[in-house]
Image (tube, grey):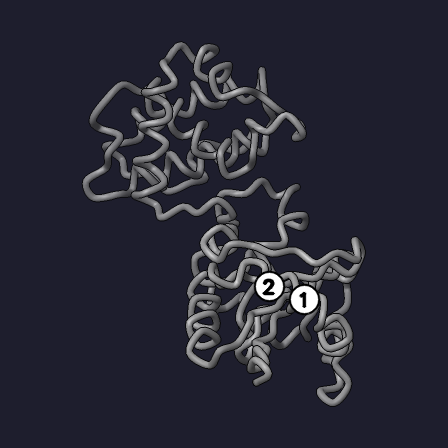
Amino acid sequence: MPKRDSLKVPEALQPLYAEITSISDSFCREHLNEEYADLARKMTATLARKRPSPLVSGRAISWAAGILYAIAQVNFLFDKSQSPHMRADELCKRLGVSQQTAGGRAQKIRDMLNISIFDFHWTLPSRMDDRSAIWILNVNGYMVDIRSMPREAQEVAYKKGLIPYIPADRDGSGAQGEDEGNDPHWEMVMDLWDDILKCYLKFADQKPIMLYDIQEKRIYTYAYPGFKNELMPKSQAHLEEQYQEALKNNQIVVFVRDNEKRELVSYSVDIPKPKP
């Protein structure tokens, strides 16, 4: 395990930090993995640096449980399709605290650190590439997967703290920009427009978000609030701007998703006026 003094912790809080991380380290070693332990240490150190630190109030075991619970939520530990997997009540039982206590501490931590469900700061490194929502950003007014953009765009996003690393440095190549005059995603939207519009009109009163999945060859209709909540906070703000502008201009926000190329792009498309 990394040295515990590798994270900055105020001297007065170091004994408490050691007590909490001793609990989380032991639990992760026995039931989870080292990635969870690393994030638990990072989160404990972050809370210790708060002024005033919330860690000074309450039992160490309660904070350890809340920290692990919060990290588990971000990484879907409670989803049985994940590995490792553990139920929320099982995690609390093994730590010896009530689920109400752990959940309450976790909520306080999420609020204090402004943690969203796809927050890359608290995502397991091994899961980072699989979380498309982490990489969706607004580029020139469109919601895109930044991994599909040239390295220059990725570097700007990284410097602004919007992404955890520069994807092009990991895969050895940067994506080349599309010819603006030949956008295959836009062509798909136009080819499928009648079907997209038909699906939209079924729920027109809800002003939904439309998405076409290339691999599945399916059109999906999403309620705006639910779709927005799946995005990172900054991406939520960009979508909010695009969505509100689309409503003003009588347009539909349409996404095209290509999982193989790791691309997600959006368009605002005019709703045709009813024929007289």
The answer to whether any part of residue 72 appears in the image is yes
Q: Quadrant of residue 173?
A: bottom right
Residue 171 visible in this rendered orientation of the protein:
no
Q: Residue at x 49, y 50 (%)?
A: 226
Q: Amino acid at mark 1?
A: Ile
Specify the amino acid type for callout 2: Tyr
- Packing grade of label 2 (10 A; few <14, some 14-19, many >=20) is many
Residue 99 relative to residue 149: left or right: left
The image quarter in which residue 193 lies: bottom right
* 142 sits left or right of 213 in the view: left
Mark 1 Cα within 10 Å, few/some/many (few <14, many 20+)?
many
Is residue 100 depicted above or below 144 in this figure? Answer: above
For the residue labelled by badge 1, is the local secondary structure a helix, a strand or a loop?
A: helix
Q: Residue at x 56, y 34 (%)?
A: 76
Residue 52 in the image, given as x and y percentages of width and height: 19, 40
Expressed as whole percent of the image width and height from the top left, the position of residue 25 reads: 49, 22
Relative height, residue 156 to residue 202 (above, below): below
Residue 47 position within the rendered picture, expressed as x and y whole percent measured from the top left = 32, 38
Residue pointed to by mark 2: 200
Q: What numbered label is drawn on residue 23?
A: none
Left or right, residue 18 beside residue 274: left
Quadrant showing the C terminus: bottom right
In the depicted structure, whether residue 119 falls above or below residue 41: below
Residue 196 is tagged as 1
- Of all residues, the one furthest to the bottom in this rendering is 181
Q: CB of mark 1 within 8 Å of CB of mark 2?
A: yes
Taking depth in this image into account, of 158 and 212 the one nearest to the observer is 212
Q: CA distance from mark 1 to mark 2?
A: 6 Å
Q: Nearer the viewer, residue 263 or 199?
A: 199
